[in-house]
Image (cartoon, rainbow, N blue to C red):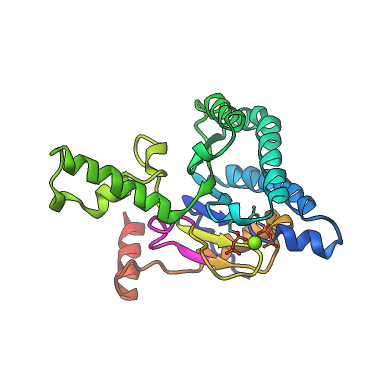
Amino acid sequence: MTQTKLNIPRHIAIVMDGNGRWAKRKHRPRFMGHKEGVETVREIVKSCSKLGVECLSLFAFSSENWKRPEEEITNLMGLFMMALDREAKSLARNNVRLQIIGELSKFSQKLQDKIKQVEQRTEKSTGLRLIVAANYGGRWDVTRAVQNLAKQVANNELKADQISEELISQNLSTYHLSEEGVPDPDLFIRTGGEKRISNFLLWQMAYAELYFTDALWPDFKDAELMKAITDYSSRQRRFGKTSEQVVAEQAALSEK
Ligand code: IPE
Ligand code: IPE
Ligand code: MG
């Protein structure tokens, strides 16, 4: 059997879904699913680091998740706090840089302080960039970018017709995480069987390859990640060009 060479995405974005159903299947409270989900995060971070993925973005809590029962929200916040506490050291040791995006002011001061502390603790890491989206919404992100640009127009620092796709991209929360800008996701994964984006990185995902799996997040371990990357590797990314153009370009590149 010929093994095709794996094409490792620079940026993988994941909607980690299915924790509740995982717990339900095991006749356990939803919280246990979230807890097991943290174990998956640990494993997937390790795998992505080893594979040389540059960025891993994880959707942990959406701006719509506030609609959940209060008890679940409290549990999720507690778990987030605990995971930050417990993982900070090993993230730094493994050269992983953790950054959180989202409207953080809605979180308790204690959680905000913890986030800052872990971000600072891992800021010198040069390996995998782990982006956790918390109280994040793609529409919120675009709205905020537009507000920033509108303020610059109002202050005569920018003309309205100078607003470009590039400028909007540069004002999104992901862009600011790195001096050279974070690349847009190449591969979008959603676990848990639903086939929707649920307001994750809307603008940034314009050309991401989409991969949906029925595997529930607590079961999405290394083997499942490899399936997703193998599937991604078999795709031809055309970005509007014809298939023949892409093949010709690749041939020219490999001749160099
Ligand atoms: C995803 O799992 C985790 C969060 C949204 C925080 P869910 O809690 O949505 O799990 P299901 O969809 O109910 O199975
Ligand atoms: C999306 O999952 C958000 C996160 C994984 C954090 P949901 O389970 O909240 O998504 P919907 O509401 O079913 O689309
Ligand atoms: Mg869900």
Residue at 63 percent of width and 68 percent of height:
213
Horizontally, is 23 left or right of 153 in the view?
A: right
Q: Quadrant of ligand 1?
A: bottom right
Residue 41 % position (x, y): 66, 47
Residue at 71 percent of width and 57 percent of height:
19
Residue 199 % position (x, y): 48, 59
Q: Quadrant of the C terminus?
A: bottom left
Horizontally, is 140 left or right of 121 in the view?
A: left
Residue 129 % position (x, y): 51, 39
Name above or below for residue 255 compared with residue 124: below
Residue at 62 percent of width and 32 percent of height:
91
Which quadrant of the structure image shows residue 202? bottom left
Which quadrant of the structure image shows residue 155? top left
**Residue 40 visible, this orientation:** no
Magenta stretch contains residue 226 = no
Horizontally, is 90 left or right of 56 in the view?
A: right
Q: Name the residue nearer the viewer: 251 or 241.
A: 241
In the rendered structure, which segment of residues is drawn in magenta? 200-210
Q: Name the residue nearer the viewer: 142 or 249.
A: 142
**Magenta stretch mostly in which secondary structure?**
loop
Q: Quadrant of the N terminus?
A: bottom right
In the displayed image of the protein, which residue is found farthest to the right? 27
Name above or below for residue 251 compared with residue 53: below
**Residue 157 visible, this orientation:** yes
Residue 188 % position (x, y): 51, 60
Q: Name the residue nearer the viewer: 42 or 78.
A: 78
In the displayed image of the protein, which residue is found farthest to the front? 70
Name above or below for residue 248 compared with residue 147: below
- Mark count: 0
Q: Name the residue nearer the viewer: 200 or 253.
A: 200
